[in-house]
Amino acid sequence: MSYLEVETVTKRFDDLVAVDDVSFSAEEGEFLSLLGPSGCGKTTMLRMIAGLETPTTGEIRIRGEDVTDQPPYERDIGMMFQHYALFPHKTVGENVGFPLKMRGVGAEERREQVAEALEMVRLPDAIDRSPTELSGGQQQRVALARALVFEPDVLLLDEPLSALDRVLRQQMRVELERIQKEIGVTTVYVTHDQMEAFSLSDTVVVLEDGHLSQQGSPIDIYENPTSEFVGDFIGQSTKLTGTVTATEDRPVLETPGVHELRLPSSVDVNRGESEAVFLRAEKLDIRDQPSGHENAFPATIRVINYLGEKTVFYCDLEDGTEVIVSKQGFTNVDEYERGDEVYVVARPEDLVIARSVDDRAPQQVEGVR
Amino acid sequence: MRDDLRWTAVKATSALVYLFLLAPLFVVVAISFNPTQFATFPPAGFSLEWYYDFFTHDRMLRSLFNSFVVATGSAIVAGVVGMISAFGFVRYDFRWKNALSSLLFLPMIISPVVIGVALTTFLTEIGMERNYLYLIAGHSTLVLPYVFVTVRAQLYRFDQELEEAARTLGANELETFVEVTLPLIMPGLGAGMLLAFVISFGEFTATQFWIQPQTTTAPIEIYTMVRTSLTPMINAMATMLIVVTVVVPLVLDAVLGKNLILKSA
Ligand SMILES: Nc1ncnc2c1ncn2[C@@H]1O[C@H](COP(=O)(O)OP(=O)(O)O)[C@@H](O)[C@H]1O
Ligand SMILES: [Mg+2]
């Protein structure tokens, strides 16, 4: 039994299936992210955990107790809303004290706990101010204090950083991680930002169009995507689709842009089948000569984006397919310019092929040995 | 340049309109302090004689008290009913919604004489006596639209995420309403109820059909008195009426510090 369990949950709004047969679970203290593009059902999933929506079918359990049909106020769940939802007619202190007041905590004890919570988010002096006087970042801290002051079973965060500017977003992300680790609350975090999800989470659940696409650790999801959707959505990569053939010991992919793309020998693919391969931008190289590399294919540099910590090359393959190459700390950027004919090098081991669990089933393992 | 001229013309016209509307009121207030029996303007002196008369005149005091009771009752009834209807129209979807919401404005549009007669027939038919309740029922109908519009406007702007936040924080439906919803719609509700009070307090046309001697309201008493005996006490009474309908709400507004009227205007 896990601490938080979501089991085959489906949510329909009339004809629209917002969440489609999703199951996942989180252990006590775990940081879990729901990651996916806008409209994939993340907020709806979160609202069902909070009790603001009722699943059409399926079950949600917290510490083994079925809460599927419990109203939100009977659950102990701290939710931070995307736009904070602070009560404008109450002071910061009253806002943070609200969940305690609703739980019948006396004024004296309330004051202490509120002060403590504000201390935790580093806003101890804001207690008597109106939330409307605070900056976005400060409002967010108040919202976090309010969601945590009553020591909820689960903390829910809906794209909490999306309304902040870049610098503040970085700071808050670090802050959020510190606080979550400090109090060890089980957390479900909704975001469309892969970087946020990866940097914060123990487990990432990727949602696609309402259904669960993949669940796993960040490394797992990045290195071993189980669907083309995840391979495409996560990271910056180029997708090449082609037909599997074979040379000597190795499977090879015939694609329009790259005639012979050598695949890692360990991969299980069938000759004659169509496959999609992802070239991660940061794992590719740019070379002047093809010699000495297994996969080196001619390309023309179209755009060079020098970004300081990295340089991104947008190149065209022979058939016009765009391939993105991203190099960290690339200092000899001056040596290249638009229109240069170069070779893009991809090591076979670095190629990412989406394999769903079904595709790894035994009957298909024969492959091309 | 021509725009300037036009603007000046607009301002001058507005000033004239206001002067035309407000001047008679100032005259009434001024001559209520006039010691002479016959109205003169400017006043011949200053005296509180007519106010003394007024405050020692039982029928006058009685009518003023009646108006207070009826206006307060109507503001409360219209406040509750208007607020609930506004919630229904903003938060829920149902058939004929637009048509029905237009219907709610009928009391503002239909001549009060017609409403006066119609409601008399109806209330008499169901056997209601002409007491305070009778008047409050009538006035509530008349002032309901004012509460409805002000609360509806407030609800359209209301961020329902605040209620959801309250519920996730442990507030049940009632606590959410008391702690979050009500305080936040108070400007609209308060303005609507003040408006309802003021309109009920000054209502004349329909009220004639609904009173009996013990429940006569202030505006009707003034009218009766003007027709029977032209005493300057009327001006004192009229001044009191102006104070109640204009000054009291504004002072209340300022004292409560919410600026309900000024904000919602
Ligand atoms: N209350 C609702 N009524 C109808 N459709 C809804 C409602 N809430 C969400 N949806 C729809 O469900 C889908 C998922 O929405 P949402 O959970 O908000 O996605 P996300 O948070 O991932 O952007 C969207 O197509 C959205 O339009
Ligand atoms: Mg969302």
Image (cartoon, coloured by chain):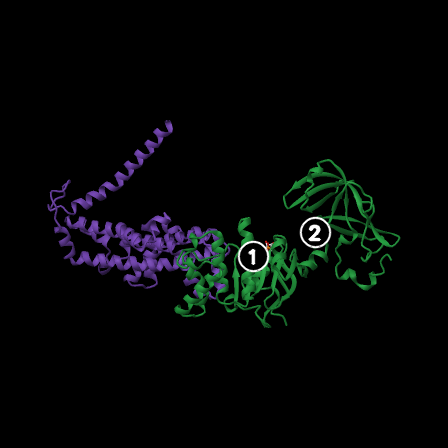
Chain colours: A green, B purple
Specify whether A177 is left or right of A250: left
Where does label 2 land, which residue? A232
Q: In this rendering, which labeled residue sits more in front, label 2 or label 1?
A: 1
Residue visible at 70% across and 59% down in the picture: A220
Q: Quadrant of the N terminus of chain A?
A: bottom right
Q: Position of residue A80 (x, y in %)?
A: 52, 59
Q: Amino acid at mark 1?
A: Val
Q: Nearer the viewer, residue A337 or B202?
A: A337
* Residue designated by label 1: A174
Q: CA distance from mark 2 to mark 1?
A: 27 Å
Measured as percent of width and height from the top left, residue B216 is found at 23, 57
* Residue A17 visible here: no
Element marked by disc 2: helix
Amino acid, disc 2? Asp
Comes first in the chain, label 2 or label 1? 1
The quadrant of the picture showing ligand 1 is bottom right
Q: Residue at x 12, y 48 (%)?
A: B47
User: Which element carries disc 1, helix, strand or loop?
Assistant: helix
Residue at the top extreme? Answer: B1
- Residue A248: percent from left, percent from top: 89, 53
Considering every residue shown, the one lying at the far right of the view is A248
The chain holding disc 1 is A
Q: Residue A303 shows which numbered tag?
A: none
